[in-house]
Amino acid sequence: MSGTKFILTTLVASMVLAGCTSVGPNYQRPALETPASLGVVATKNQQAAVDYAAWWKSFQDPVLDSLLDEASKNNQDLALAAARIEEARAVAVGANSNRYPSVDGNLGATRTRTSENAGKLGAGASPYSKDFQLSLTASYEVDFWGKLARADEAARARLLAQEASRGLIQSSLYANVAQSYFAMRAADAQLALAESTLKTRQENLRLQQRRFTAGATSELDLHVAESEAAATEISYTQAKQALSNIESTLAVLLGRSASAIAQPVIARGNEIGSLHQQLIMPADLPSDLLNRRPDILSAEQALVAANADIGQAKAQYFPSVKLTTTAGYESRVFQDLINPASLLWSLGSSLAQPIFRAGAIGAVVQGAEARKNQALAQYVQAVQGAFRDVHDALNNTAANEQVNVASERRVTALKDSLRLADLRYKNGYSSYLEVLNAQRDLFQAQASLIDSKRAQLSSVVSIYKAVGGGWSKPEILAGK
């Protein structure tokens, strides 16, 4: 058995030596100029510390919470991301396994007949023979230049990138569900406003018809009333259409069945006004976007993988050393197979040094370096996009807050205008057209106020998303 011990000793020593040297550049995070602070928008809304992993809790709407839970369980984008993670994990396991010896067990039995006329048989020898083999075969590539180590590094980085990509999908999903929910509640309010206004216009039309029949008003006032009633009916129909489309969009985000999407039934919680009253601006914003944003983490891990690919490519310039060994038993008689006299073993090694490849290896290296440059550009773009998202979200929130305050003042003023116009008309100081203009302006202002509340809610959600809210970095990425 001394031969077997020698084989095992050689394999262990080779594994220890393997990976001592890895060609190619070691990864270093690119040095980028980033702001020390993200800044906080001045706001009249209440400010408080926010749990960015569950920012939606601040709106205090149990229905919104339940919809987000449903989406996290059933959304198909998340299911697709989870499957991609499993695929990347399988690839990583496969890449890591290449760094270890492969061992195969072999059991063979053959029966052969030799030609009696070939002159190969001795006198009186039987032309029939048997052979039985039981052996273990091991092979191992000594990773002197780190080719396999770099492949393992690249596969693990791609697994981390998929983990972070799932975080991006989850963060975006929560933001999209919340914003769609706000849009639905705003559409509910728009529909209620349109329905109330339509009833008012229809009542005005009936009144004008009676007055025209009695000769108390002109045909012009009657036609104006008819026009306003028809215009409000159009607004009511469009509001129903918009609401139905938002419901189907939300049903898809929730991962519901095809039949549930065709006939969406979405639960309602707080009204848009109540949601707006619960709006909380974060007291401070985390500045470590490079470590929080899942898309930046994913882009960086893709860069890590591309960097490791260069080492794999450059390792092809150097010799590859492979060790093979076989140990087992062989006998012509099965009963004598497990017998010390039947022992066999072999040890072999091979070294292959590329001599001439017509530039093939250099092309592979150039391609790997080009892919790293692409990954670097994508990483820089991800960082740029992250800080732009924060800037735009803060800017939009500040602007939407001002629009909302001005919209509330406008509604208050137009309500007074309508009251005065109605008094003037009833006392004969103005035509009915003045009342209709006041009603029209008030309706448009009320609709704009509803939309401004939705826009401000949506922009605050964009802030949470922009700073990487809505996901928790898993342990596999925690140390990265």
Image (cartoon, helix red, strand yellow):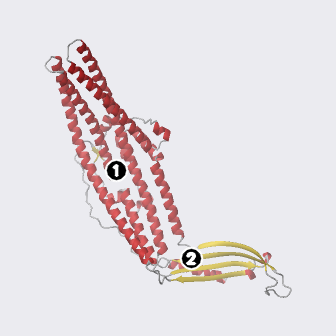
Q: Is residue 175 left or right of residue 441?
A: right
What residue is pinned by disc 2?
140
The total number of labels drawn is 2
Determine crowd level at label 1: few under 14, some 14-19, many 20+ residues with C-alpha closer than 10 A. Answer: many
Q: Secondary structure at mark 2?
A: strand
What residue is pinned by disc 1?
465
Instruction: Measuring from the top left, give residue 79's x and y in whole percent.
Output: 48, 51
Q: Secondary structure at mark 1?
A: helix
Residue displayed at 48% across by 57% down: 84
In the rendered structure, find residue 411 and report the number of the disc placed on it: none
Query: In 3D space, how far apart are the residues under numbered discs 1 and 2 (Cα atoms)?
Result: 48 Å
Split into 4 quadrants, where in the image is the C terminus? bottom left
Q: Quadrant of residue 452?
A: top left
458 in relation to 99, above or below: above
Instruction: Measuring from the top left, give residue 131's x and y in whole percent.
Output: 76, 77
400 in relation to 414, above or below: below
Residue displayed at 34% across by 33% down: 239
Whether residue 451 is visible to the viewer of this picture, yes or no, is yes
Determine crowd level at label 2: few under 14, some 14-19, many 20+ residues with C-alpha closer than 10 A. Answer: many
19 in relation to 156, above or below: below
Residue displayed at 32% across by 60% down: 381
Nearer the observer, 193 or 53:
193
User: Extreme left residue here?
Assistant: 429
User: Extreme right residue here?
Assistant: 124
Q: Is residue 384 left or right of residue 313?
A: left
Instruction: Measuring from the top left, give residue 471's x and y in whole percent.
Output: 40, 52
Whether residue 69 is visible to the viewer of this picture, yes or no, is no
Q: Amino acid at mark 1?
A: Lys
Q: Is tag 1's residue or tag 2's residue first in the polypeptide sequence? A: 2
Nearer the observer, 407 or 237:
237
Q: Quadrant of residue 191?
A: top left
Q: Amino acid at mark 2?
A: Tyr
